[in-house]
Amino acid sequence: MEATEPARRHTTFGQPVQHTHPHLISPGEVIPGICLEEIQARRRMLLFSMKEFCAKNLDKSIKNHIVIIPAANKKYMSHKIPYVFRQNTDFLYLSGCQEPDSVLVMEIDGEDQCKSTLFMRPKDKHAELWDGPRTGVQAAADIFGMEQSYDVALLKEYLMKYSFAYPNAITWFDEKASDLEDVSKIVAGVTHNHMRSPLEFIHNIRVIKSPSECELMRKTCEIASSAINRTMAESYPGIGEHHVFATVDYCTRMSGANFLAYPPVVAGGTNATIIHYVNNNQIVRGGEMILLDAGCEYHGYTSDITRTWPVDGKFSDPQRVLYEVLQQVQLELIGCLQHAGGETLDQLFDTMCTKIGKYLQEVKLIPASCSGLELSRAAYKFCPHHVSHYLGMDVHDTPLVSRSIRLRPGMICTVEPGIYISQERTDVPPEFRGLGLRIEDDVLIRPDKQVEVLTKTCIKDRQLLEEMLSNRHSTVDKH
Ligand SMILES: [Mn+2]
């Protein structure tokens, strides 16, 4: 017993595995929440979709395909000071491997035999003393369910042999998506055959989330929702935007998130009319609203939420008018997902423009004479961004999947209409100028035209919001 146990315990890897981190990784899983078979199935699905595409659209005689996906490399903010490492999303999705400077190679042949090879950095005592353990070449095939694994230094030789054996194979590789310059050079040097980008094929698979991915998305959305509820409850007139940032960052991490998924927008008062405001260094005064756009990353899966609330707890009349318009529009947009006007994300955008136009006419911010395309254009001046993007491992997930394709079960997207009125707009009454609002939820498309709002616990109803904020005053007045 004693002879084998310590050896097992002292085996170290470049990332959590089941026996070193049982609190994170359950039996059968490679990364938290995702099991080995699922990642292997993703690789097979990718290879078969490429082969099928090629037979239909390119050249039926091409039987062999090789796909090369490099990992991310470490990036530095200044001399020897690294940024937090974030793995290349496509590489992580297809391998489960969290190590930098690795390369995944997948092959399919004429008999539909699939083979995956992981090229890894070798174990290196000195480097590991400084940067932490590496998984190494030997353990990699086993941990990541690959047919084989090699030292990354052997990549060139491997690819040369392959290209010699299968001179007609298609090489699927995207130089622009590669952080690893050496890999790009090697691939260019050994590949004289047909080369194409694999990204569109990968994104088409990634855009549909599996049940286990949906579970991770529920969790990341739940964490961000309660963090934002608490952040709203802890705000008070005079609070710094930076303090709001710190609260949401702290709350998400304390609930198990790895980090915030993007630099949050914390915009008090007129700063909210700047859509990507990230300076977050102003004081929010009584009478102003805060627009907070924040989400977190939980084991590789991201949330993306926006809420706008009055810092002193009660909307002023013009703020309330706009908030109620926006809340109504946002609810109706969620309601029309997969129905007329919401069958694609681009349709949803057109619907948003029509609805914002109509409701802003009702409150007399757009002239009643406006109609049709003119009305949509007038609305677009109030909300100059798209209403939705796909969401998943990346915040702007699977960008190569068009927003004009029909929504299908398993897709996850945001619904985020906004109204922004800059100080300079002389065509609206002065009391509305300088106000900026956005409401953003994350939604899972379900079968039978159902949707699941993953961020439903994050308070957004105007009345509930004011009730929550007024209850907070008893404790917060102390500030
Ligand atoms: Mn968003």
Image: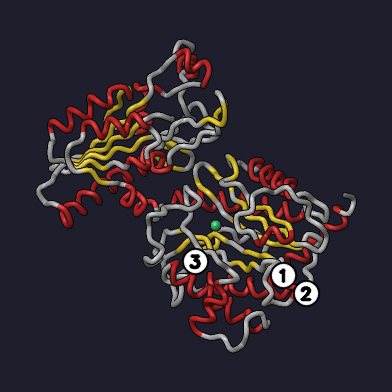
Return the residue nearer the eye: 133 or 127: 127
Return the residue nearer the eye: 284 or 210: 284
Residue at image position (20%, 49%) is: 51
- Mark 3 to mark 2 CA distance (whole Å): 33 Å
Callout 3: 10 Å neighbours few (<14), some, many (20+)?
some
Where residue 94 sits, quadrant-wise, is top left
- Mark 2 to mark 1 CA distance (whole Å): 13 Å
Above or below, 125 against 435 in this view is above
Residue 134 placed where, x, y %?
Answer: 44, 22
Which residue in the structure is indicated by mark 3? 451
Identify the residue at the far bottom of this view.
369
Name the amino acid, label 2. Asp
Residue 426 placed where, x, y %?
Answer: 69, 74
Above or below, 145 against 453 in this view is above
Name the amino acid, label 1. Arg
Which residue in the structure is indicated by mark 1? 433
Callout 1: 10 Å neighbours few (<14), some, many (20+)?
some
Eye-nearest disc, 2 or 1: 1
Can the viewer see residue 1?
no
SS for dot 1: loop
Residue at image position (46%, 26%) is: 14
- Left or right? Give the position of 342 relative to 292: left
C-beta proximity under 8 Å, tags 3 and 1: no
Residue 57 placed where, x, y %?
Answer: 18, 57
- Going from N to C along the chain, the mark reached first, 2 or 1, is 2
Residue at image position (58%, 89%) is: 369
Which residue in the structure is indicated by mark 2? 317
Residue 138 placed where, x, y %?
Answer: 34, 21
Residue at image position (67%, 66%) is: 422
SS for dot 2: helix
C-beta proximity under 8 Å, tags 2 and 1: no
- Going from N to C along the chain, the mark reached first, 3 or 1, is 1
